[in-house]
Structure formats: C-alpha cells, structure tokens
C-alpha cells in the first residue's frame, strides 16, 4: 500500500502521531488494530523482517527504541502492518544516539515524563505530590539468574522530607509480563495502597514510613521485588525525577557473565542514550556503578553476552 498518505480514522491515534511519543503511538496503534505481539511477529516475518517479542515489547512501552538500520527497516514494516502512512513512526524516533559522556540535565522532571503509563494509577490513588521526599542515597542490587532473566531487585533508600507530615513513599514498577512480581523484604516501612494496570504493566505502590517526618527529617526504606520467569534481561535502569546525592547500582550475574557492561544515561525514555566507558566485572561476577550527584533523568547499565 505504497500510496497511503492520510492519517488513521481513530482520533486518539491521530493525536499521538502528531504530538505523542513513538512508544505511545505504537502502543495505541497495536491496541486499535487488535494485534498481539505474536501476530505482529508473524506479519513482520511474512515481510522477511525478524524482531523478537521482547524488542517489540520494549519499543511499545518505551524501554528502548529502534535505531539500527535493521530496526528502522522493521519500523517501516510495522507501519505497513498497522496501516499507517509511510515514515509516520520513523519520523517520531528523532536522530540516532550520540556516543560519549552525557550532559546531565538540571532541575527536576515531571514524573509523567518518566512514568507516562503510571499517570492514571497515581491519579486513581490520589498519590501525594512528587517532591515531598528527597532521595538522598539510592542503593539497588539487581540479580540476573542462570537463565539470564531478572530474578530480584533489592532497594535501599535514604529519604529526607521536604514538607511537614510526610508519612509515605510512592514507588513505581514496570514489567512487560502478565505475572506481577512480589514485593517483599520491607524494612522501616509497611505496605500501603497499590494500583496496577495489567495492559501496560504499570504498578504504583505506597510504602508507609515507620514515622511521620517533618521538614528536614530523614529515614530509611528497604524493600525487594522478586520476579517470575521472563524474557532475557539486557539492561536495567533507574528513573530520577529530582536530583539525588548518590546512586549505587550493582548487577550480579548468577550464570554467564556478559562480554561487556556499559553505563548509560538518558533525559527521558525517548531521548538519546549517552554511553560511558564499559565497566569491569571481576571475580564477584558483579558490575558496580556508583554515580555521585545524579541529575534528573535515567541512569542504568546495559550488557551483551557473546
């Protein structure tokens, strides 16, 4: 259908194609067409295009974006499968990612920019405004199991109140699998309310602090997510809406150790990735990333196996 030039009939899809992100437009187009990722794979294969289900899911939910030549070819084939005008999705991707060290953004980011799929859940839960708690120190330990799948994430937060009578911490999670992970190992806090959206994989959970904090008072929160079997994991990141003092990310590989492990930064999920030099993985089979004074945006590690 090379002659297609008109935009789709669906009003929301037209709006997203003009003003939304690549991930939002792709997600909505798939829903409008009623196509599962398996069916999309099948249609792409008929056009001699091979894309994994995990990659399609990452693109759909904004965890990564297509950039290589073969990925852009897949996006053009997706436009055909979804009956979209040529170059509609490709034009939303912007320029390819530059290499080198990142220029860190200043100030703060609206949490809706970093967690777009979570906005309705936050509204339904009437969550407190972002910024009432500052995260001074964040320590995360990520365990990748023998099957190269995400097994667990253990988190320790040092928080400081920026308002009076702060009694809760709101945490976010995104998962592409229908089976939700288990939140456990709570210390210095207890469970509050939780909201989830199975279609997008978004989860928002309140953790009630042991004590109500006044301005300037500090506390510690610890928790762990245990994940069911899922796709092969090739990266992990944390999203910062406010500046912090220190971020420590440890990724432990219980099975194969990847050939390389590279730190990266982004302003938002749709922004170019800025790459730092690869990290050394020693006898502990753990990559250690320590970032002092992280700025708003996304910081993480990506890796590849031989």
Image: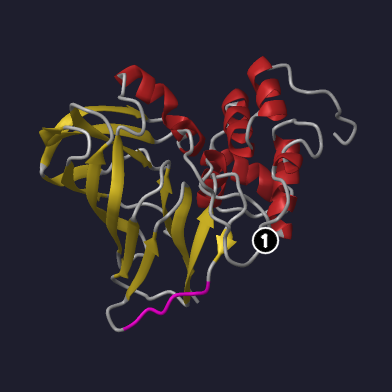
Quick one: 242 or 179, which is closer to the camera? 242
Q: Which residue is mark 1?
A: 98
Q: Main secondary structure of the magenta part?
A: loop
- Quadrant of residue 247 in the image? bottom left
Q: Residue furthest front?
A: 216
Where residue 206 sits: x, y (%)? 23, 31
Question: Can you say whether 246 is above or below 259 in the image?
Answer: above
Q: Position of residue 201 (x, y in %)?
A: 40, 36
Query: Residue 277, image x and y in percent?
Result: 52, 74
Indicate the quadrant where residue 233 lies.
Answer: bottom left
Which residue is depicted at the point 58% across and 65% down?
Answer: 101
Q: How is the image coloured?
A: secondary structure
User: In percent of the image, x 68 and y 15: which residue is there?
Assistant: 11
Q: Residue furthest bottom?
A: 283
In-image side of 84 versus 170 (left or right): right
Residue at the location (37% across, 24% down)? Answer: 121
Q: Nearer the viewer, residue 182 or 186?
A: 186
- The question of residue 288 being in magenta is answered with no
Residue 45 is at least partly visible in this image: yes
Circle 1 SS class: loop
Q: Is residue 234 visible?
A: no
Q: Is residue 263 above or below residue 78?
A: below
Q: Name which residue lies at 53% across and 54% down.
A: 104
Residue range (magenta) = 277-282
Look at the image and tell me in which quarter the N terminus lies.
Answer: top right
């Amino acid at each position: 259908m090379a002659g297609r030039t008109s935009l789709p009939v669906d009003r929301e899809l037209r709006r997203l194609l003009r003003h939304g992100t690549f991930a939002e437009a792709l997600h909505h187009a798939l829903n409008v067409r009623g196509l599962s990722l398996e069916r999309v794979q099948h249609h792409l294969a008929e056009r001699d295009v091979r894309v994994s289900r995990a990659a399609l899911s990452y693109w759909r939910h904004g965890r990564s974006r297509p950039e290589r030549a073969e990925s852009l070819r897949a996006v053009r084939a997706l436009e055909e499968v979804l009956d979209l005008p040529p170059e509609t999705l490709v034009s939303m991707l912007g320029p390819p990612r530059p290499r080198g060290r990142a220029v860190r953004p200043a100030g703060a980011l609206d949490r809706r920019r970093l967690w777009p799929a979570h906005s309705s859940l936050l509204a339904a839960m009437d969550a407190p405004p972002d910024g009432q708690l500052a995260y001074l120190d964040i320590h995360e330990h990520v365990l990748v199991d023998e099957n190269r799948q995400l097994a667990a994430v253990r988190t320790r937060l040092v928080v400081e109140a920026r308002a009076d009578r702060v009694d809760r911490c709101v945490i976010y999670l995104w998962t592409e699998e229908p089976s939700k992970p288990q939140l456990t190992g709570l210390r210095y806090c207890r469970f509050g309310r939780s909201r989830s959206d199975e279609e997008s994989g978004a989860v928002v959970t309140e953790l009630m602090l042991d004590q109500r904090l006044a301005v300037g008072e500090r506390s510690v929160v610890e928790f762990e997510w245990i994940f069911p079997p899922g796709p092969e994991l090739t990266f992990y990141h944390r999203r910062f809406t406010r500046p912090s003092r220190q971020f420590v990310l440890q990724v432990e590989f219980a099975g194969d150790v990847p050939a390389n492990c590279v730190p990266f930064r982004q302003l938002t999920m749709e922004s170019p990735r800025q790459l730092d030099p690869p990290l050394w993985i020693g006898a502990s089979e753990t990559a250690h990333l320590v970032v002092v004074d992280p700025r708003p945006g996304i910081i993480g590690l990506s890796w590849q196996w031989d």
